Image (cartoon, rainbow, N blue to C red):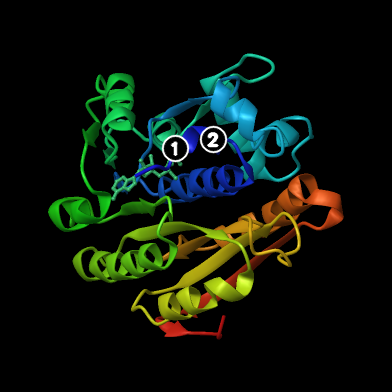
Amino acid sequence: MNYRHAFHAGNHADVLKHSLLLALVAALRRKPAPIYVLDTHAGRGSYSLVGDEATRSGEAMAGVHRLLGSVPQSQPLRDYLHELAAFDASMPMQHYPGSPCLLQAVLGAEDRMASCELHPEEAAALKSRLSGDVRIAIHQRDGYEAIRALLPPKFARGLVLIDPPYEAREAEFDRVLFSLEQILSRWATASVAVWYPIKSRATVRSFLRAASQLPSRAAWNAQLMIRADSSVLRMNGSGMLLLNPPLRLDEGFRPTLSELARVLGENGQGTGELTWLRRDGQPVQDP
Ligand SMILES: C[S@@+](CC[C@H](N)C(=O)[O-])C[C@H]1O[C@@H](n2cnc3c(N)ncnc32)[C@H](O)[C@@H]1O
């Protein structure tokens, strides 16, 4: 486990992941019943944007800082920037919130969340940040194993976020697919969001094809490429796969993807694409 999210916090992938995550939770919370959230790979909750890791990588400069320098047009991006400012109002922003802190900010009093993080230091940092919140349980454990231990929850509605490091790329995609099957069989009504990196779009096709065969009610996939995928040596973009998405979330998020492609794309090469994989319990197209 060498992965440290501190190098990547606030990059284009986090911007895609977190703006869509917030839009997803807002859509789920439009109904009055409480929701349960399982964040399988939670990280430490907060990341310095002025520390050694962030300055060395420069990823946040090309990601969230660029967005902060624009005037966001789409509602999901306005909501995302609102949450970032509520977390750290300093200018320029010095601390970037990870998924547990963003979720904490938007959950209601009756909602509940479990956040899993395997790395001892990251888990300790997360505990010291969130342990006072009675709605949130923090587990230092394998997030994939937690699926079997913690699901189904007592609430019918909610969300599982799967955001692994993909250090062993193919094995991680396989584990994700296995976990998706488990989630659907244990908690069929849950929405599930999976973030994944893209070097070249061709290499994620088999993953998406396999996901489209899983027995969800519906599924779509949002991809943000910040440059052409001609070089497969680096992450050229990323995607979020959603199973059982809330109705009409796709309509609200399509313009966001175009806007992100425009603002974060390098040399005009950015592209954003939202593709349906399943509707009404059936695969709709071959990704
Ligand atoms: C991409 S980061 C998570 C970022 C976080 N979800 C966010 O949006 O702010 C992946 C995290 O998973 C942790 N990790 C790696 N393998 C894990 C596992 N099997 N179970 C739980 N956490 C794991 C890593 O230590 C790392 O902090």
Question: Quarter containing ligand 1?
Answer: top left
Above or below residue 96? Residue 158 is below
Identify the residue at horizontal 20%, vertical 43% (top origin): 141
Is residue 35 in view?
Answer: no
Q: Secondary structure at mark 2?
A: helix
Residues marked 1 and 2 touching at CB (< 8 Å): yes
The label on residue 4 is: 1
Identify the residue at horizontal 33%, vertical 78% (top origin): 215
- The one nearer the camera, 280 or 257, is 257
Above or below residue 287? Residue 51 is above
Identify the residue at horizontal 18%, vertical 57% (top origin): 152
Looking at mark 1, is its residue's CB closer than 8 Å to ligand 1?
Answer: yes
Image coords of residue 218 (percent x, y): 44, 73
Q: Secondary structure at mark 1?
A: loop
The quadrant where residue 257 appears: bottom right
- The one nearer the camera, 70 or 188, is 70
Q: Quadrant of the N terminus?
A: top left
The quadrant where residue 268 appears: bottom right
Residue under circle 2?
7
The label on residue 218 is: none
Identify the residue at horizontal 38%, vertical 59% (top origin): 192
For label 2, the crowd category at 10 Å Cα-Cα, with few meaning under 14, some 14 to 19 and many 20 or more, is many
Is residue 203 in view?
Answer: yes
The quadrant where residue 255 appears: bottom right
Q: Is residue 214 left or right of residue 139?
A: right
Q: Is residue 243 left or right of residue 58?
A: left
Look at label 1 and name its amino acid. Arg
Image coords of residue 196 (percent x, y): 50, 58
